[in-house]
Image (spheres, rainbow, N blue to C red):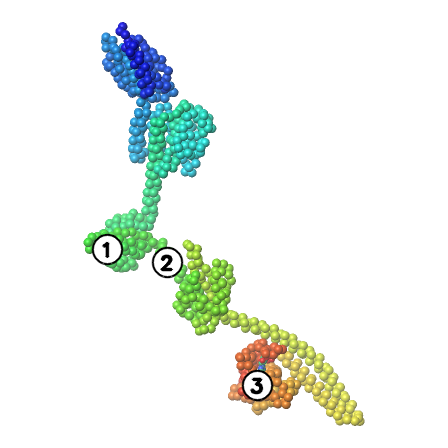
Amino acid sequence: MAISYFERPTSQRLLEMLRHTLDSTGSFLTLVSLHEGTCEIVGRPDWLRPIVDHPAYRTSWRQLVHNDDAEKLYEAWSSLLAGNSENYSVDYRFCDRWGEYRWLREQVAVVSTDQHGRPVEMVVLHREFTPTVQRDKMLDAHDEIVTKMTEGMPLMAMLSKLAETIEAHFPGSRVSVMMLDAQREHLGIVAAPSMPPELVTTFSNIPVGPEFGACGAAAYLKQRVIVHDVREDSRTIPYLPILEPYDLRAIWSHPILDGSQEVIGTFALYRSRPFTPDAEEIRLTEMAARLAGLAIERHSQAELLVRREDRFRRLAESSRIVPWEADGVSDVYLYVGPQAEKIWGYPQADFLKPRFWIDHLVHPDDREMCEELCSKIIAPQELYEWDYRTVGADGRTIWVHDVVNVNWRGSRLAQMFGYLIDITDRKQAEEQLRESEERYRLLAEQSADMISRVDPSGIWRYVSCACTSVLGYDPSELVGTYTMDVVHVDDRREAAELLMAIDRWPDVPNFTCRARHKHGHYVLLETMGKPIYDAHTGRLAEIIFFSRDITSREEQSLRVRAREAELAHAERLSTMGQLAAELAHELNQPLYALANYAQAAQGLVAGWEVPNKQMLLDWTAQMMQQARRASEVVRRITSFVRQGELDRQPVNLNECVEEIGMLMEISARQRGIDLVYELGESLPLVKVDRLLIEQVILNLVRNGLEATEPSEGGAAKLTVETSTTAQAVRLRVIDQGRGIPNDKLSCLFEPYFTTKPDGTGIGLAICRRAIESHGGVIWGENNPGGGATFAFELPHASPAAGESA
Ligand code: ADP
């Protein structure tokens, strides 16, 4: 047998060189000698299983070839061994020592044959080309995924497809695609085609954090995490009970990012043995993660688009806005939005009929107005808008706001388009508002109180017509003017202070101020205010004032107060009267005793013969007379104080004067004043309560006496004069006193007006009431030559009553 080709001396060196070359390229040779039955492997990469170099072990070699590729390899071999071919080149997947497949390209060269031309010695070159294949396949997968994406493949199906592709290209690996939840706090598996279902369930809620497995950490750190061996990495040790039963020993996980570089999930590869991926594998897995990100983002964008479209569609359908287009010449609708059917209830086709708009849609009452407005559509490029009523198929009135655009062709109106907005609700609300405002306005106008609206700067915006009766102004005279202008200067400060406290209204009590009437006088206004705030800004918008004229109420309450004081005084006087009556009663007894003793003394003296007997008789007579006079005075006082119901009798005033003459004289004499009577003759009778009128006369005389300074020479006098007029009997008391100060003339008869330190001021007031209650008048005036005259007139007693003197 010829010397073997492999045993030639020079080839030994060549073999050494070849081994080197093969090692550096990751390839190996198999030198097969069928004749020798040897199979030598030259250059042995570390991933290759320790395969026995004998051709007998081809069987075991063949077992390491991927099932799908075994047949083509077998065919190539068979053809070569049969001498049908001299060489071949076959690609196939070959199981490495860890059970994972690599792509090998096997090329055979026959170096010697037997006489039949069948190979005896061969050189087989095995070259690993896994990364290249993967890249190509990945690119194919990439294209496929992108195509599916554009075709709208469901997201989950797409992610599963991606995972399957990766698993196919990294034989023996498993893939999981996880996505973050809405809170971005947990990851859950969304695609993991070769993971057992129970593991998918277990990985449905992995927290995001630096210590929560490779995926939790990758999502948290936003970077690739490689766990070479799950048993040695603190991040995966807690998960060992879950991972180990499924032979998951190594993991590398890539974060999936969206367009704005935010983490949305993870893409992870699991191996069944401790593993370190090479750069190419990492690059391809990263590419897969990017693809997943793209698919997820595209899906969410598509979803968003669908949601938006759906929202827009629903908005358009539910909206009360109806777009339309019409012919510029015939006014016929060419198009109306589908909502029209829902709003008006006519079939959509009806809208497109000639003259449908003006003859059917527009309310009969608004047709003229609409036609007129249409005739005004002349200027090009303008927008026309107006509100009008339309009628629905069921006869309902529907208010619309019509916006019309016009297109002109030269000078011809070519086309109109626009939109109709159903504004029925707004119009109804406006109508309700108008009605309610009208009701309030009516209420305000009907009210006797003045109702006004004032802006925050104090300017009147509205004043109800009651201001005419309260302040004398027409509302138009006040609107636009400053409120404080009518307030009395002395009250402005208080009014302004109350306005400052407006925030606390209406807890602030009503305030009272004087307001100037148009005629110059002041009226007393009691005012209540209510601040109105702007609903949007919360700022003070205006103040509503309710002002009531309480002038007469105030005057009345003054009068009531005066009357109360009067009554109190009267009560005091009445108590005094009681006292006086009791006193008179007590005095009567000693006066009678005095008179009786004087009479007895006179009787005794008359029987005696004593010197100056006559003088004693005169004196006792005087004593008797004075005692009787005193008794008469007491009787009169008693009569006065017992005054009760008016007891009207026809009376001659002169008799009244005489009746009280004695009392008047006592007072006059005490003051050294002469009392002069000038009593008219044949005075007509007056029908009066005698005692009351006597009291009046006595009061006037007493006042006259008190006003007169007693004079040394006794020249001062006080005249009581009676006279008659056509209708009445007059009595005047004329004094020579100090007179009445001119500014006091008007208040002489008012209760409690007095200038005397111990006066009551009630005398003249009672006089006036007494005289007026008899239908008479009373007055006081100064005399031209000094002093004052107080006088009263009482009407003649009616002759019909037969009461004349
Ligand atoms: P009084 O006498 O208690 O003051 P009157 O009502 O009788 O109460 O009188 C009221 C006031 O009228 C007096 O205080 C006085 O100032 C004034 N007056 C009344 N009569 C005269 C008079 N004859 N001359 C001047 N003043 C008078």
What's under tag 3, amino acid-wise? Gly
The image quadrant where one finds the N terminus is top left
What's under tag 1, amino acid-wise? Pro
Q: Which numbered tag is attached to residue 380?
A: 1
| The CB of the residue at mark 3 lies under 8 Å from ligand 1 | yes
Q: Label 3 crowding class (10 Å Cα cut-off): few <14, some 14-19, many 20+? A: some
Q: Which residue is mark 2?
A: 431
Residue at horizontal 34 percent and vertical 33 percent from the top: 290
497 or 668, which is in the foreground? 497
- Residue 94: x %, y % from top left: 33, 19
Residue at horizontal 32 percent and vertical 10 percent from the top: 38
- Residue 346: x %, y % from top left: 29, 50
Residue at horizontal 48 percent and vertical 58 percent from the top: 503
The image quadrant where one finds the C terminus is bottom right
- Residue 39: x %, y % from top left: 32, 12
Q: Quadrant of ligand 1?
A: bottom right
Q: Are marks 3 and 2 in contact (CB under 8 Å)?
A: no
Residue at horizontal 57 percent and vertical 73 percent from the top: 563
Q: Are marks 1 and 2 in contact (CB under 8 Å)?
A: no
Q: Which quadrant of the structure image shows residue 138?
A: top left
Left or right of 551 in this view: 688: right
Q: Residue furthest top?
A: 1
Q: Label 2 crowding class (10 Å Cα cut-off): few <14, some 14-19, many 20+? A: few
What's under tag 2, amino acid-wise? Glu
Q: Which residue is mark 3?
A: 787
Q: Earlier in the sequence, mark 1 or mark 3?
A: 1
Q: Earlier in the sequence, mark 1 or mark 2?
A: 1
Q: Label 1 crowding class (10 Å Cα cut-off): few <14, some 14-19, many 20+? A: some
- Residue 238: x %, y % from top left: 47, 28
